[in-house]
Image (spheres, grey):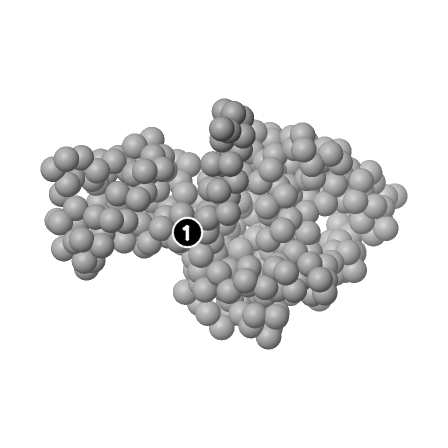
Amino acid sequence: MQDKDTASDLFALMLFVRGFKISKMLQVAAELGLADRIASGPRPIEDLARDCGANPAMLTRLCRALSAFGIFTVDAEGRLHHTPRSELLKSEARPTLHHAARFWTTPGNWAAWEHLLETVRSGKPAFETAFGMPVFEYLKQHPEEARLFDAFMQHSPDDRHAAVVEAYDFSDAKLVVDVGGGNGALLAAILGATRKTRGLLFDRKDVVAGASATLAAYPGRYAIEAGDFFARVPEGGDVYALSQILHDWSDERCRAILKNCRAVMEPGARLLVIERVLDEVPGRAYPMNYLSDMEMMILCEGAGERTVAEYAQLLAETGFTPPKLIQTRSPFSILEARTLS
């Protein structure tokens, strides 16, 4: 006879072992837009099946399985209802997990994680084992997955962009250069929180192609420039932001990015490194940070989340002061550094 603690641990671990199945179920629910389709109230699953082109019996079974984990509720009449968990799958929810549910099981991620054992043994990123190319090259060749990635980054459930502008005062910045800023979501949050600050979005041409739509609410206050931050970084900023950039790269590649920033920064300019920061003792830290570290290990050669000490070392090696750590209400922290005189 198992005691309660053993039974609880057994169920928890069973859920972890089979968690990939729930991830895929959530992805299908998000792809079919189930949460949005019942936003105004419960609806018969047969009607939902007709609307989204699904088999009614199979959709019923999917909804029933999700409801067993508190995601939606299916009543005796076969109608689908929201629960607090399923509300988070609505595309317009804040926070929302709609985009995350779709992104994490894209073909790229799904296939890469299959090779985790090889990564642990060899030290080589699983993504390149699976696809024979780096992840960013893959995204260039798979624009639909790239769009999902951008949407996930823009609508991150941890609300990191809003958290950053709440935690850091950008009001005295004349020009914020968002280096590797993707579709401009962080820059839009910064411009929305200030009155006079201007922004320059800098990233690869294919990445910034749709950024004007994200920044459209701030006409005259932003510019978009295409380029490669391993080759150069634009001049003229008094704040340079690197948000979720350094964790993608090895120490050597990070030093190249930081040196390019340092080369164009005038005295008094600030560098903001916005990243998850690992605690020295994993058991007392936010566990999602370590899942993110595993994701980076899977995706890119030498990539990973880092501790404050590890970021401080990179900054010291590239001509920056020791960083000031600024916590936000999200899992992301801001490390502020300035150039050494």
* Res. 227 in view: no
Q: Is residue 70 left or right of residue 9?
A: left
Place residue 275 in its image quadrant: top right
Q: Residue at the location (64% across, 36% down)?
A: 333
Kindly identify the amino acid type of the residue bearing the numbered disc 1.
Lys
Q: Quadrant of the C terminus?
A: top right
Q: Nearer the viewer, residue 191 or 91?
A: 91
Please state the horizontal and vertical placement of residue 195, each as a whole percent of the image: 51, 35
Q: Residue at the location (69% across, 36% down)?
A: 282
Please state the horizontal and vertical placement of residue 61, each as a whole percent of the image: 24, 49
Q: Is residue 338 left or right of residue 289?
A: right
Q: Residue at the location (61% across, 70% down)?
A: 129
Q: Is residue 123 left or right of residue 101?
A: right
Q: Residue at the location (31% across, 50% down)?
A: 29
Q: Furthest-top residue in view?
A: 4
Please state the horizontal and vertical placement of residue 313, each as a whole percent of the image: 83, 46
Label 1 belongs to which residue?
21
| 78 w.r.t. 210: above or below | above
Q: Nearer the viewer, residue 97 or 195?
A: 97
Q: Nearer the viewer, residue 114 or 148?
A: 114
Q: Nearer the viewer, residue 280 or 191?
A: 280
SS for dot 1: helix
| 186 w.r.t. 203: above or below | above
* Res. 298 in view: yes
